[in-house]
Image (tube, helix red, strand yellow):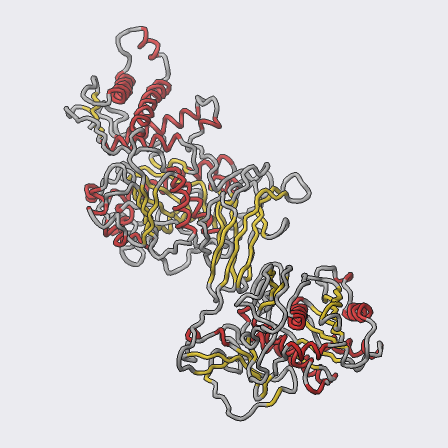
Amino acid sequence: MLLLRRRSCSGPLLLLLGAAVCLFYQNRNRLRSGPKPPSAVLDVQSRRPPEEVLLEETRRWISSLETLHVQVWSQRPPRRAVVLTGHHLVSDPEVQLYQQVLQQMDYEVQLSRYAETSSLLRTDHGVRGWSLLVCLSSSERSCLRRVSFSHLQHHQTVNLLPRIIEAFSDAGEGLCHFYSQSHLTGSELPMMPHACGLTNQRLQVPQDPAGADRHSPAGAPPPALVAMVNIYVLVTSVKPLTSFLHDISVVTTNQEPRGWPIKLSNFLLQRLGRPTSHDALGQIKKVIGDVLLAALSTNEKQETLSRCVLCYQLLTFTLLFSGSITPVIVQVETDLTFSSLSRDTFDGQITKDLILEDTLHFLSSETQTEGRQYGGCRQTDGVCLSEDEFLLLLQFQRQLKTPSAFQLLYPSSSSSSSSSSSSGPLRVSDLLIQISRYYELHRNQSYITDESEERTNQEPALSSSQDLSEGPCVDPLLRQIYSDPPLTLTPPFSPRVKEYRAEVTFDTVMVRIRPQPVSSACRVHLDEHRGPRMANYPVGLGNSRISILVTDDGGEPEPVVMTIYTVHVYRESRPSLPMFGDHVTCGFVQDCGLLVQPGRSCGLQPLIRTQSSLQTCSSGHVPGRWVVPCLSCSDNRTCDWREVAWQPDRCYHPLVDRPLLQDCLTDRKLLFIGDSTNRGMMYFLMERVNSSLEDWGKAHDTLIYRNLNGGQTLVSYSYYPQFWLEKNQRPTFRQALLQLIDRSRPLVNSNLTVLVVGGVQWLNTNHLRTVREVLNRESLSDVLVLVKSLGMGFHLPVDGIRSLSLKEVQDLYRENQNIITAAKHHGYEVIDTFSITMGRYKEFLQGRCACHFHEVEKFWSSGLSDDTPSTTNTTGTGPELGSQSVVRDTDQEAWPKALSYHVRGPVNQVYSEILLSRLCSKNRN
């Protein structure tokens, strides 16, 4: 114990601190008792204002505290933090934040679900081997059960204060527990008694009083304040009470029912003006301080049960302003809550993370003192500081001095001292008040010569959430990458690591991304210089890449890219169970996740195979279904999805082996017009006929390939529609078709000339009439026309492109049927790609439209790899068409040693094989 005598100080082992406190105490009494016998020093001091003398003596005492702090810190214990995650995943931003910040603060971090599962908390009342314990919301009960707060050591910190939690717990129907334990009535405190626990009804902001207008004319009195404001409070000690409020609040008004985060002082200043806003902030502090004092005064019997000096508790106070600057507390929660902020924009999580990070830094003042002794109290006629009290004073002083996002709530510098008018002994609460007054006087009397270096949190500095938004981007780093669903990044996110990988399950078809920069002077754009700061990304099967550009948008016509982060996302294939024994055959037309045809069944259905012989299909639009072997049709996880195949009803599409395909395409010219899905079929055909694909590109213009099939086959392609151009500058379909025909001449008016037209969703019956008119005018009426019908895509809510509702997708199915009918009327062949893609719409590959069922891979290999589908089949009479239908052709020439490409995608392969089958059917000879 540390002894502070009123007249003389002796006994403490730390003489420096003892002498300073003694001097402070003696001068304090001298100011109370009037002038002393004349002396030069006393005469000078007696002529100085009492506040000035008190300020000087407090400064000396604080200087001694800081000196002792350095001595104590030189022997700090090891720093080990335990974070109990509860139901939070390791990938949750809150868990990642604690890991990242604590590791930056030199903590060794251990993650565990609950206290019972942590190796450090299982024994010795859960208080050995750690210095910081963080219990996330879903693990609080586990912490309170397992950890004995009465056995905590001086250097240990927990983010819970049991007395606070109990005081504001729900005693039934939202009644605060401390109300039920006291004789308070609702009128004695500026708080609704039923403000604790989860409320069943949503808190409502009252209507603005008559005449209250946000946009008052200049010179008019400020409007009445009507708003719901969430204030975030940090309690760092229960007895005596010390608490702080964060400078960020969340505000909801009738004009803006969706809450928004804003600096509290800025909000009050905007709504009330300068003098009134200062008074309103004072009222907020008084209201919250009065409620905290009342709540803690009702359960003081628990004081001996807890001796955690460095523990803390974060709370959310919801304040209602109804026209007065004095608010009423309508809800208190012993956690940080952001229910009024939008989940879609991650505003709640971002604000929470900023406050949590500010809290960790604010509490990081180095007050660990394990193994130190501070002497004993030899007499009772004096002030005795226990070790706990000394640590409290030391922490309080460091927190007030250090710039932060928190400002003092209680005790305020205007709080009354219990011994301010008597000569009784000083209490710790008195010392806390004197420290707070010192820093306020220090600021008000301009004792600080360099405010930028000596700013205290009596006038809060800009926090991590309040960076300057003007000026250059000098710190082009990300604070965090937020995603929904949360991505588990490898390596774990760190601002200075620029490249990450993540894996998602098959059912994750879209990820929402919002990167947050460290500095608000920097901007974030996704994928390109002018890209959005937040976006939905379709996640195709296999690999996808998300580029995050941190830019400086000021001072230049175009944003200047300062840093690029890259996230590689791998989406798993559909879970598959290999078939080793008996199985059943299941079929499906559509997925239950997207009912394109409401009148038909969805999902897997038992399929009974017929024993009768099947004939070859007479068209490419014969209805069919996907079939797959499963252990049970009621569980798609029991299926071998490697064997899924397309089966037309009562017929089959014969596979065309490579020699027959080369012969079939000899002396023929194939003209493709359409979008990238049409181009994917073209490249599949080129690889099949040549056994390799040596030329490939994402062309958006006209291409001519003359080296196909040993120079005996020509393939040409024209991209349509050119959606990136302004509508008045886009070539019409007629113009694009005529250009393709002219570039491909000479052409023969027979089935030796083939026109393949179609795409995802732009094609309609008018285009087919245009095809007929152009071919007739160009004397090509007898050429073979194959129509690729519509396909699935644009069904996800992706930013920047159109997104179809369920009804619009269903309308698309009906339009597809109209296209098939019109094509048959004109005598054209149809490949019904809509029915084929409908059941496997989740199996799209890269691309924002979620409409690509193919992608092209690059190879440098000198031979075919074992997992590379070859281009020749050995069986052409089976009823199903699947990705396993094509096997390696070992009799053909080896894979070229130069750079080659391979078109992959089982769905694209199916309808492309149907295209080849229709090109080379027997009646074409």
- Residue 32 visible here: no
Residue situated in front as seen by the camera: 90 or 746? 746
The tally of labels here is: 0
Residue at horizontal 52%, vertical 55%? Answer: 568
Residue situated in front as seen by the camera: 6 or 192? 6
- Residue 714, position in %: x, y? 75, 71
Q: Quadrant of residue 893?
A: bottom right
User: Where is the N terminus found, in terms of image quarters?
Assistant: top left
User: Where is the C terminus found, in terms of image quarters?
Assistant: bottom right
Residue situated in front as seen by the camera: 759 or 907? 907
Q: Residue furthest left?
A: 379
- On screen, residue 870 versus residue 115, left or right, reads right
- Residue 822, position in %: x, y? 71, 82
Figure check: 474 above or below 95: above
- Residue 698 visible here: yes
- Residue 524, position in %: x, y? 57, 47
Figure check: 46 above or below 836: above
Figure check: 353 above or below 419: below
Residue at horizontal 59%, vertical 76%? Answer: 910
- Residue 506, position in %: x, y? 48, 66
- On screen, residue 13 versus residue 872, left or right, reads left
